[in-house]
Image (cartoon, rainbow, N blue to C red):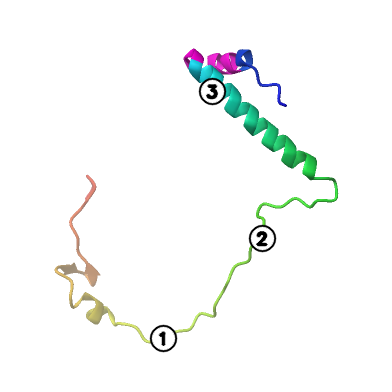
Amino acid sequence: MSDITPELVRHLASLARIDLKEDEVIRFTEQLALIVDSVAKISNAIDASTPSTSHPIAMSNVYRDDVVEPSLSQEQALSGAPDQAQGRFKVNAILDEE
């Protein structure tokens, strides 16, 4: 059983400048105790031979080879644009800048 008490919860709440009602203190005491006990169980299951991991299964990136394929020309890409200027799509400014 953890050492989480209502007094400790009140103290932590005062440090965090959180105003708790008495029913909240009781509820948080129970919830924090459960969390601390759960972490303790996990900590007890781990010994010095257990390797540290950030994920439960091995993570690896999946890469594919880049293949150059034909694409649209600049004229084809701009052909459906409602407005264009200097070979680029022209859009309305969204910021207060020119």
Q: Residue furthest bottom?
A: 70
Between disc 1 and disc 3, the foreground one is 3
> Image check: 91 left or right of 38?
left
Please name the residue that numbered disc 1 is placed on.
69
Amino acid type shown at disc 1? Glu
Q: Nearer the viewer, mark 2 or mark 3?
A: 3
Determine if the magenta segment contains residue 16.
yes
Locate residue 26, reporting x and y percent.
55, 19
Mark 3 Cα-neighbour bin, 10 Å: few <14, some 14–19, many ≥20: some
Q: Which residue is mark 3?
A: 27
Dot 2 crowding, Cα within 10 Å, few <14, some 14–19, many 20+: few
From mark 1 to mark 3, how far is it between C-alphas? 62 Å
Q: Position of residue 16 (x, y in %)?
A: 53, 19
Q: Quadrant of residue 38?
A: top right
**Which residue appears at 25% of the width and 77% of the height?**
77
Residue at x 54% of width, y 78% of height: 64
For mark 2, what is the residue? 57
**In which quadrant will I find the N terminus?**
top right
